Amino acid sequence: MEEPEKNTNPLIPDGIEKFVPFCIVCRQPVPKKRATGRSKDTCSPECHKVLRKYRKYVLESSHCPACYHPSTPEQRREFIAWRKSRGDRRSTLGRPPVKREENLRKALAEAVGLLKAINEEQGGEISAILEPVSRFEKLIDTKAAE
């Protein structure tokens, strides 16, 4: 029967007990408390800030910060220039107001007709509703005349 070989990792030849992680920014040993937390790659908050700035720089230099598609700084400058040349987009958003008003008038006209039909069906029981309806009808007629 063969004796099992002691399986040692070549990266930690002295064993895991003697392993000391090092800061990836300044190469100082990472304190034990910090080595088990979220910022286990760095030895101090200052090094962590430097690491975050570096990672942000790497990401922005290779991908668009908005959509994460691969891009170069030159392509982003061209895109920003193109967007500025188009002008303010907020003024062009949504439907044109004329179309919106026209659709509103049509919807109100349909609602007036429906309410009148319901009123006739019920024998005039909901005539209190028809007063504001007649005002809407007049509004629709005046807007249509314009």
Image: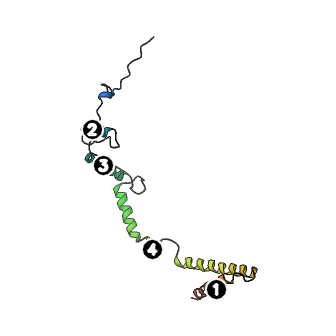
Task: Residue at 33%, 48% (x, y): give it.
Answer: 55
Q: Quadrant of residue 108?
A: bottom right
Amino acid at pointer 3:
Tyr
The reply to whether discs 1 and 2 touch (Cβ–Cβ < 8 Å) is no
Query: Dot 4 corresponds to which residue?
Result: 91
Task: Report which quarter residue 8 is drawn in.
Answer: top left
Q: Give the Cα separation between the discs numbered 2 and 4.
A: 56 Å
- Looking at the rendered structure, the kind of residue marked 4 is Ser
Work out whether mark 2 precedes mark 4 in sequence or the reverse, and give the earlier one: 2
* Label 3 packing within 10 angstroms: few (<14), some (14-19), many (20+): few
Callout 3–callout 2 Cβ contact below 8 Å: no
* Residue shown at the point (54%, 79%) measured from the top left: 98
Mark nearer the N terminus (3 vs 2): 2
Reply above or below: 27 against 77.
above
The percent coordinates of residue 40 (x first, y second) are 32, 40
The first of marks 1 and 2 along the sequence is 2
Q: Where does label 2 land, which residue?
A: 31
Residue at point 39% right, 54% down?
71
- Of the two numbered discs 1 and 2 in the rendering, the one whose residue sits closer to the viewer: 1
Which residue is disc 1 drawn over? 131
Residue carrying label 3: 54
Q: Position of residue 122 (x, y in %)?
A: 75, 79
Nearest-to-viewer mark from 2 and 4: 2
Residue 100 against residue 32 in the figure, above or below: below
Q: Quadrant of the N terminus?
A: top left
Considering depth in this image, is 25 or 39 the residue closer to the camera?
39
Image coordinates for residue 64, horizontal then vertical, percent:
39, 55
Decide: marks 4, 3 in contact (CB < 8 A)?
A: no
Rendered-image quadrant of the C terminus? bottom right
Q: CA distance from mark 1 to mark 2?
A: 79 Å
Name the N-terminal-most of marks 4 and 3.
3
